[in-house]
Image: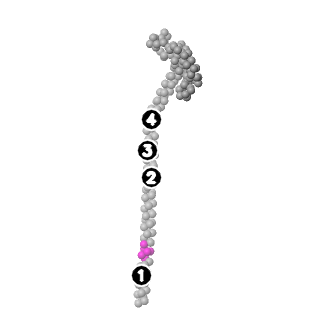
Amino acid sequence: MSGEITTIIVSALVAAVSGPVGAWVGRKLERAKYRIELETLRAEMNKKLAEVKSNELENVRKAADILMESIVPPLKAEITTLRNDVQRLNTVLERIWSCRHIDSCPVKFELLLSPKGRGAHQRGNGGACDDEHQRMRGAHPTPRGDPDEGDPQPGDDCNGD
């Protein structure tokens, strides 16, 4: 009988120990399995993030190319046109000083005034007070003749003809 009791006690101990040990070993195996699965998912996620960043960079490159193709050339053309217009205007303005009507030329008078927007006290009169400004305006009371009258010598009156 004592052998049977020993067998029962040993089998009871083995049953009592094997359950938790089996659960512990099973948990370790499951944990290892989940770690591998988690690492795989993280690798896939990093790969997807890299693809997204690559796509974003490609979209930015395409947008920059579109910008360079559709916006920059018209702006360059506009700048060239403006430069040509300014050069033409400078040429015409230089001709004012050799015009025979320079004494009463309103264009020359406006060129001698300071640019607008300098402040309340400077109204484009080079810092002169209002009396001086009126006197400057009064110095040229007569405008040029009617442009439809015809010019005795074309090219001498700053009209460009």
The image position of residue 145, as x and y in percent, is 48, 12
The amino acid type, in three-letter code, at marker 1 is Ala
Q: Residue furthest front?
A: 131
Point out which mark residue 59 bears.
3
Give the secondary structure at mark 1.
helix
Q: Quadrant of the N terminus?
A: bottom left
- Magenta residues span 18-23
Task: Calculate the distance from the C-alpha at mark 4 to the C-alpha at mark 1.
Answer: 87 Å
Residue shown at the point (46%, 13%) measured from the top left: 146
Q: Secondary structure at mark 4?
A: loop
**Is residue 19 shown above or below 145?**
below
Q: Nearer the viewer, residue 50 or 82?
A: 82
Distance Cα–Cα, label 2 vs label 3: 15 Å
- Name the kind of residue labelled 4 in the image: Ile
**In the foreground, 70 or 149:** 149
- Badge 3 marks a residue whose secondary structure is helix
Query: Which residue is denoted by mark 4 in the rendering?
Result: 71
**Residue 157 visible, this orientation:** no
Q: CA distance from mark 2 to mark 4?
A: 32 Å
